[in-house]
Image (cartoon, coloured by chain):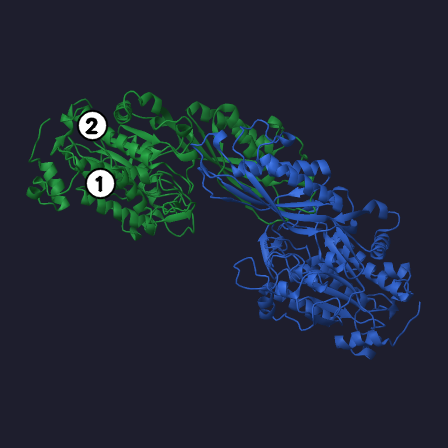
Chain colours: A green, B blue
Amino acid sequence: MASRLYSPALRNVFKSLGVNWTVALKGRRSFSATPRWNLQTRDMNEEHLSSLRVNQCRLLEDIHYTCQWGTGERWGDAPTETGMSRLALSDSDRQARDWFVETTESLGCKTTIDSMGNIFAIRPGLKNDKAPTFAGSHLDTQPTGGRYDGILGVTAGVEMLRVLNDNWVETEYPVGVVNWTNEEGARFPKSMVSSGVWAGSISLEDAHNLREVHPGTATMASELARIGYLGKTPSSYKSIPMAAHFELHIEQGPLLEMANKKIGIVKGVNAYRWFTVRVQGRDAHTGTTDLKSRADALLTAAKLILHSHRLATANNALASTGILHLTPGSTNTVPGSVTFSLDIRAGKDETVDKMTQLIERDFPAIASGSNILNSQEGCTPSLPLSVSITQDFNSAAINFHDTCISCVKEAAASVLGLEKVDALTREMVSGAGHDSVYASKRCPTSMIFIPSREGISHNPREFSTEEDCALGAQVLTQSVVRFDRLRAEGKI
Amino acid sequence: MASRLYSPALRNVFKSLGVNWTVALKGRRSFSATPRWNLQTRDMNEEHLSSLRVNQCRLLEDIHYTCQWGTGERWGDAPTETGMSRLALSDSDRQARDWFVETTESLGCKTTIDSMGNIFAIRPGLKNDKAPTFAGSHLDTQPTGGRYDGILGVTAGVEMLRVLNDNWVETEYPVGVVNWTNEEGARFPKSMVSSGVWAGSISLEDAHNLREVHPGTATMASELARIGYLGKTPSSYKSIPMAAHFELHIEQGPLLEMANKKIGIVKGVNAYRWFTVRVQGRDAHTGTTDLKSRADALLTAAKLILHSHRLATANNALASTGILHLTPGSTNTVPGSVTFSLDIRAGKDETVDKMTQLIERDFPAIASGSNILNSQEGCTPSLPLSVSITQDFNSAAINFHDTCISCVKEAAASVLGLEKVDALTREMVSGAGHDSVYASKRCPTSMIFIPSREGISHNPREFSTEEDCALGAQVLTQSVVRFDRLRAEGKI
């Protein structure tokens, strides 16, 4: 281990902290008890790596402190037992962003805001001529979301910065934390839109013109400008390149908890495809129209939703409807028209393709009266209805980068102990989309999952234990440092 | 046949018309070509009755003239091929009401407006010491309604007045036309509320306090006052008694058209019951929650809606869901909670009771996973969900009055011809509620149906042919006159 007392990079960190360098060296600033004074990743051995300890209390304090902005529905008695409702680019999102900028700058980072409001906080390295290695996620939430989805990944990134500072770690190249805008797609209806723009997969214009779902007056561009986060730096991997992107996230599913695992080593992301299905029948009076004279769009939609579930069961896929609108919407009028969303997912692209084919074949047939998979059993034959199916979004299965996956595996082994790592980790595929999907198109990427209680997410009751959050943050920190060490060693 | 040249009642009619009685008697006023000059119902034989001819063009002119107020969505090229959007107590409803008052007064009626804005136009009879026989319906429409529902019944009543005047008919007792307020319940959410107040079934206070659905600022009382139709006469069968209530209406269903029938002789109204069903599951991420770990409230609602249809099919009943709300409403969130309306109808109270029992037994069982009627076939067993079922409204089956039904039957036979009456009429039960439901609680009542094209109603495309409208008006006119004749003969 080399000790470099006068690292220019660390000096920059301290300078931006407002810390007198000489005073700092004299040890008056209360960093952690770690005795090292300038540890370079290139010199770190396994012992050094495992000594980078996350401060669990401090991490949880950051999580809950930032959840004062956009606090959601209460589900328990404890102060932190509420959900979150922090829609992207709302006033509460602005407050969380301000905290992120102030905090990372106070930790020695330089922050850059791009034209999608993505915030990149970069901590200088020994050499600054190459792209930083990033940890990243998002601070926005679903309207009835929880305290962990996205928020954990960003606050764990901040905790990583604190741990690096505490331990006087100097990375070979810069490391950073990124807060991506509107990952949820809840307010502006395109998930991961801002990492998508950064990756060049979505045009800036399309993204800027996205209109909020309710009440529909503002666009992303107008809200970015309103809250002061319309940055001048073009949102692009060309302007702000990344050496790698690591994302810590709650699993949002039940698998880790059910198997008593602590860390999910995420090797990729499920393929998924979103559709809008429109069923066109005919409005009719509920009291005067006998069953056979109806073209009941809601009854047909019920058959189609049930059918999509049966197809998913038969094909080892997922099928879900989260939105349904009907017209005209009166107790005594049979709905003439129903529109619903359909979300199809599977581990393989071929399975999603097959589900798509089956749906496109079966839905119109069922609407016109065919008894596919007994869908008409016990029903009165009615007038035929028409169905149109529009594909809104397609995300092919993603395979993450082997080097990143290895870093996470090794970090998990270090954090959990070699003897326990197999029992406590699980390789898995993410069922949800994440900003890492777009990041992976432009840089080596992987993800780390921790258990979600009962698999509940997008719900105020979403919960992960403090220990699991800290474990995840520790694996994240080590993964970033390990990746930087590989770079320092010229191995990547 | 007696001819009474100096009837005091007819003199009143002419006086209110501003017609000089002597001049009228000299035949200068152009009434129809009927040569009679003062025909009393008590003296009318079948030939006289069948000579009371409705003027088809004039009736349709009234219908379409009044549809200038509140014209709705266009569906065809002809000037009259639009729907209607005349919500109760709106400005356009006020204009239609003004027309009704002016027109019936110009035809010799005295109008009374009660505290619910119901308008009673009464044409004097030979004797005026007993209650009038009424034709009645309503001028308000659904927000996306048609030109015939309600409007036909009122304009046919006006045509009846014109025919009586044309033919110098003097009824034994007064006859009248009533326009009931807010029958649709579309703006103020209680159907038939004003005939309900008149009948003593709904309190005036509850009705006056009904708040409009959108935007929710006005009440019935404030809107009645605003448009000048808050009458001083108490809305009650005690203040404004009726000897009988006949209502001409479009069928709003397909049965007459499908059977090539012209007149429906309505013997009563279906029993119906409205429920709100709440399904409680758990919000979950669509991508990360495998099918067996879900409590998908919308998938369960789909099974329940389908099941209600199967129960209706098996029990010769109707089951319909016209409203469905889900939360949280995001493409990638499995809905944790769904609320939907359920409208159950049948000809007999016992059938509605049985359907209620089956639904209350089966819905919670299906939500918790029971495979009732194969409702879980091909599905992945999931977490259990809970269901609550609230009854919102109950309307027992109504049997109309035998004497009124006989009058309609005899009128139909006279209008259609004895040889054709069986082929062209059908006895039926109304599937929809009408003001006649409440009227029937306080006076002998029945209804007359005419075919609706394709059974479409509560829809801009609602349509009945001019011939059918005129046939219906003719049967209505004769029914009222026949009822008055029975009164004159002391038979009722």
Q: Nearer the viewer, residue B194 or A177?
A: A177
Write the residue at 78% across / 65% down: B242
What is the x, y in percent for residue A402? 28, 22
Q: Marks 2 and 1: which is nearer the front?
A: 2
Q: Is residue B74 visible?
A: yes
Q: Which residue is mark 2?
A: A49
The C terminus of chain A - image quarter: top left
Q: Is residue B479 above or below residue A319?
A: below
Q: Which residue is mark 1?
A: A121
Q: Residues within 10 Å of mark 2 (few under 14, many from 20)?
A: some
Q: Which quadrant of the structure image shows residue B160?
A: bottom right
Q: Which quadrant of the structure image shows residue B96?
A: bottom right
What is the x, y in percent for residue B395? 71, 52
Q: Which quadrant of the structure image shows residue A75?
A: top left
| Pointer 2 or 1: first along the chain | 2
- Tag 2's secondary structure? helix
The N terminus of chain A - image quarter: top left
Kindly report the distance in space between the C-alpha atoms of the residues bearing marks 2 and 1: 23 Å
Q: Is residue B308 above or below residue B191?
A: above
Q: Chain of mark 1?
A: A
Q: Amino acid type of disc 1?
A: Ala
